[in-house]
Every structure is written in C-alpha cells, then in structure tokens.
Amino acid sequence: MMLLDLACFDCIIEQVEKGEDKTFDGTSIPTPFEQVNNNGIYEFTCLKGHKAKTVIDNINFEILFEYGLNAIVDGYYRESVSSLTSAMERYFEFFIKTILRTSKNDFELIDKSWKKISSQSERQLGAYIMLYLQVFGEEPLLLNPNSEIPFRNKVIHKGYIPTKKESIKFGNSVMKIIEQSLLKLKSKYQNECFETFDHYGYKKKAEEDIKKLEEETGKEQNTMFVNIMTTIDVKNGREKNPKDGRKGLVEERIPNIIKRREPRSLILLKDKPKTK
C-alpha cells in the first residue's frame, strides 16, 4: 500500500509561533500518512487532533510510477506492471503537451486536440515518437517489441501474474524510458516543461477547488502544499544531487521505500533571532 507522508498546517504554525531563541527546535512534528487518491487533496486528522488539509505538488505519472514500486514492495506484481505502464503512458502525454507548448499553443487548444486521441494509446505513442524525432533528431527509447511489449500485454490483457524479478526488470525498463526522455526534455525546454507540470499537476486543480469552496463557505481553508519526493521527479529530480537517496535502479529503491513507511517526524529549523 502506497502511503504519502504529508504535513499538518496547524502543527507547523504552532511550532513557528513558539518563538524560542533557538537555531534548532528539537520538538518534532508527527508526520501524517494517507493513502493515494486521484485529486491530490488529502484531508485528515493529525496525531494532535487537528483537522488538516494538504495538497501534493506533483503530477500523475510521478505518483503512478511510485505506486508501481510500492506494489512491488507489497508483492502485488501484476498491479505493479499495470501502474508502471500507466506512468509511462501518462509521461508520453506530458511530453507531447510540453512540446506543443514550445510552439506557444494555449493549453486550451492543446486539450482540445488531445481529446481526439485521449482514448487511443497507439495514436498517442505515434505522436510521442514523431515529436521526439522532430525535437531530438533520433528515435526515443521504447519497450522492446519482442519481449517487453508481449510481457506487458500478457500481464494486462491475459491475466498473467508476473514474478517479483519480472516486475523489477519491467520497472527498470520503464524508469529508463521516462528518465532518459525527461532529462533531455528539461535540458532543452525547462520553462515549458515546468509550465506544463504546473498546468496539469494536482496543485492547480486543487487550488481551484479550494478557492471555490472558500467562496461558497466564506471560510479560509488552511492548506499545506507539499512536494512528494518521487523516483521520477520533474521539478526536483534525483539527478541534481549525486547523494540523493532516490538514486539507483528499482531493486535499490525498494529498501528506501520500506524505510519511508516507518513513523517519523518533521523538524523545523529556525534562524537565530537578529540582535539589535
């Protein structure tokens, strides 16, 4: 089961308002965990009894890939292949929309055009291949048509239950396909890449929903926004830091995922008060 480690707005405000003259506040804040949902808004009661609301600043394929890794940890190997495949397909969508954005297309027009192929995965794949070729002058890395595609189809369409080893191998292939493409995309079109992330990520829609709720109720919604540090990460990629704990292949990520499920707390770091 994939659990997201979130944050409670009221807990953090309490810590900030304590105002001790310390650089390091040793009082920890319990980290709440919640199961993944589809809208990125998480409402929960923290360990201190606060009613909290947190929104994740991520995009669907980041979470889907992590979901697939968590399924491997839990022994749901068939579900892992399904989630990893979905992550790859949603990344292709992200890539296509980012490239269309580089031509100054409005997102409204992009969405209108995408709608015509939104239920046709083969056409989406074709669009991805052609745009990748146009932008980078080479074919993109894809699943092996002789082994990996038949394996995926056997799992998803024929009910085959893969082994842990097969799931990990497939996960590594998907990881390489996405990361290799994403790194090149960010290197050449970082601004458009981040614009597309912001437009289609969970945060934008959540902000719209929260604003609507505030207008309807007349009450301000205390909301935390957090970025879940995922293996595939658009804005905070693991390539930035050689010592990043998310480094490595799928088999190396599994111990890290298990460790992140353990109870832990946030620690606030404070600047020393300025002396007059």
Image: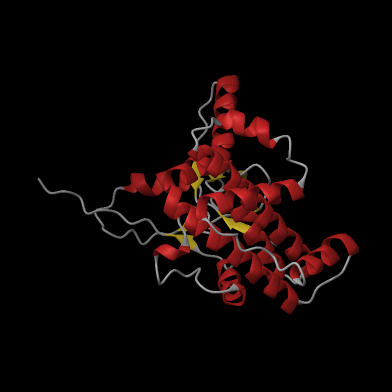
Quick one: 11 or 87, which is closer to the camera? 87
Q: Residue furthest right?
A: 158
Q: Quarter holding the N terminus? A: bottom right
Against 157, is 245 above or below? below
Instruction: Say left or right for 160 vs 181.
Output: right
Q: Residue at x 45, y 47 (%)?
A: 189
Relative horizontal placement of residue 41, taking residue 191 as reference (left or right):
right
Asked whether residue 230 is in view, the answer is no
Compare residues 168 and 114 and report the one nearer the observer.
Answer: 114
Q: Answer yes or no: is residue 123 visible.
A: yes
For the point 60% across and 45% down, the residue is 96
Residue 10 lies, with reference to residue 160, above or below; the image says: above
Residue 57 coordinates in the image, percent (x, y): 52, 46
Q: Horizontal and vertical percent for residue 47? A: 56, 53
Quarter holding the C terminus is top left
51 to 21, vertically: above or below: above
Return the residue nearer the eye: 4 or 204: 204
Q: Residue extending furthest left?
A: 276
Q: Residue at x 38, y 49 (%)?
A: 15
Q: What x and y, as percent, mark residue 128?
A: 63, 50
**Residue shown at the point (58%, 40%) measured from the top left:** 200
Horizontal and vertical percent position of residue 119: 77, 42
